C-alpha cells in the first residue's frame, strides 16, 4: 500500500484550499490588541527587572553615583548663584541706606 | 533587592554631600565673616576689592560722614513732622506751609550734596575702575534707578 504509485501521485497532486474561519479578521485584530497591551505592561516589567538586576552592577551603579554627584553639584551652583545675587543686592541696599538719609527715612516705619 | 537599596541610598548620600560641599564652596567667597565692623562696610570691602589701606581710609570717611548723615536725617524728619502737623491743622494755604516745604526741599538738596561729596571721597580711595563702579552705583541711587544693576559685576 505504501508503495502504491497511483496513491502517491494522487497525494502529490492533491491541493487543499481551506476557507478562512468566519471570525478570522476580528480574531487577528483582537490578538494584535492583546499583544500591544501586554507590550505596554511589559515595559514596566522589563524596567523593574532592569533596576533590580542590572542597576546594582558596578558599571551602572557607578554611573548612577556620578549622576547623583553631578545633579547635586548643578543644583548647588544654581542655588548659590541666586543666593549670591540676593546677598549682593541686599548688602548694596543696606550700604546705600546707611549713607543716604532720604533712603534711610523711606525705610522707617511711618 | 538589598543591593539596589544600598545603591540608591549611596546615590542619595553622594548627591546630598555633593550639593552641600558645592554650595558651601560657592558661598564661601561671598559670605562675610563679621570682624567687628558693620556688615555693609564688610560688603563694600569685598565688593570693591579694597586693600586694607584703602579700607582704613574708607572706614575713616564713613565714620566721619555718619554723624553728618544722621544730622540730615534728623532735620529732614523734624521738617516732615512739622509739615504733617501743619497740614493736619490748616485748611487753607499758609506761608508757614510753604516755608516748611521749601525747608524740606533744601534739606533734601543738602543730603544729596553731602552724600555725593562723601561718595567722591570714597571713590577716590579705590582703584580707578572700582571707583567708577562705585560711582555708578551712587549715581543710580541718586537718580532713583536700580543701583545693584548699575554697578555691574565685581572684577
Image (cartoon, grey):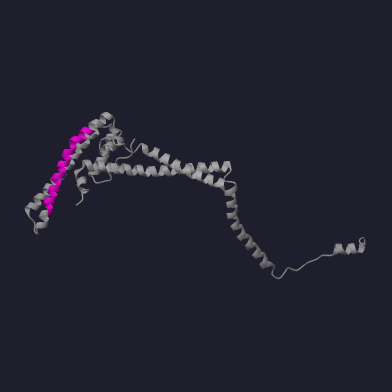
The extreme left residue here reads B95
The tally of labels here is 0
The extreme front residue here reads B2
Q: Residue at x 85, y 63 (%)?
A: A13
Closer to the camera in the image, B93 or A76: A76
Q: Is residue B82 magenta?
A: yes
The answer to whether residue A79 is left or right of residue A1 is left
Is residue A76 visible in the rendered image? The answer is yes
Placement of B45 over or under B84, stated as above or below: above
Q: Is residue B145 magenta?
A: no
Please state the horizontal and vertical placement of residue B128, each as a whole percent of the image: 28, 32
Please state the horizontal and vertical placement of residue A56, each as a whole percent of the image: 57, 44
The extreme bottom residue here reads A22
The answer to whether residue B95 is left or right of residue B43 is left
Q: Residue B73's quadrant in the figure?
A: top left
Q: Residue at x 7, y 52 (%)?
A: B96
Please state the horizontal and vertical placement of residue A77, each as a whole percent of the image: 41, 42
Q: Residue A96's quadrant in the figure?
A: top left
Which quarter of the rendered picture does the C terminus of chain B lie within? top left
The answer to whether residue B94 is left or right of residue B109 is left
Placement of A3 over or under B27, stated as above or below: below
Q: Residue A33's quadrant in the figure?
A: bottom right
Is residue B149 visible in the rendered image? The answer is no
Closer to the camera in the image, A69 or B65: A69
Q: Residue at x 14, y 50 (%)?
A: B80
Q: Magenta residues: mostly which secondary structure?
A: helix
Closer to the camera in the image, B30 or B144: B30
Question: What residue span does the magenta drawing correspond to?
Answer: B59-84
Amino acid at each position: 500500500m505504501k508503495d502504491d504509485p497511483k496513491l502517491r501521485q494522487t497525494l502529490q497532486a492533491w491541493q487543499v484550499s481551506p476557507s478562512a474561519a468566519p471570525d478570522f479578521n476580528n480574531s487577528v485584530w483582537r490578538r494584535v490588541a492583546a499583544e500591544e497591551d501586554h507590550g505596554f505592561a511589559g515595559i514596566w516589567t522589563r524596567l523593574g527587572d532592569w533596576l533590580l538586576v542590572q542597576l546594582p552592577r558596578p558599571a551602572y551603579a557607578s554611573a548612577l553615583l556620578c549622576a547623583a554627584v553631578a545633579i547635586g553639584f548643578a543644583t548647588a551652583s544654581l542655588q548659590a548663584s541666586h543666593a549670591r545675587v540676593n546677598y549682593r543686592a541686599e548688602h548694596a541696599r543696606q550700604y546705600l541706606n546707611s549713607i543716604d538719609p532720604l533712603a534711610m527715612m523711606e525705610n522707617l516705619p511711618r | 533587592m538589598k543591593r539596589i537599596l544600598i545603591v540608591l541610598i549611596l546615590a542619595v548620600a553622594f548627591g546630598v554631600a555633593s550639593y552641600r560641599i558645592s554650595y558651601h564652596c560657592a558661598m564661601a567667597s561671598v559670605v562675610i565673616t563679621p570682624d567687628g565692623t558693620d556688615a555693609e562696610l564688610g560688603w563694600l570691602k569685598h565688593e570693591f576689592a579694597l586693600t586694607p589701606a584703602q579700607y582704613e581710609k574708607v572706614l575713616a570717611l564713613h565714620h566721619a560722614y555718619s554723624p553728618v548723615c544722621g544730622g540730615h536725617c534728623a532735620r529732614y524728619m523734624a521738617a516732615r513732622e512739622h509739615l504733617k502737623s501743619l497740614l493736619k491743622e490748616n485748611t487753607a494755604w499758609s506761608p508757614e506751609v510753604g516755608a516748611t516745604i521749601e525747608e524740606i526741599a533744601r534739606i533734601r538738596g543738602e543730603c544729596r550734596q553731602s552724600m555725593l561729596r562723601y561718595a567722591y571721597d570714597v571713590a577716590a580711595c579705590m582703584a580707578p575702575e572700582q571707583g567708577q563702579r562705585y560711582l555708578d552705583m551712587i549715581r543710580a541711587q541718586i537718580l532713583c534707578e536700580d543701583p545693584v544693576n548699575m554697578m555691574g559685576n565685581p572684577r
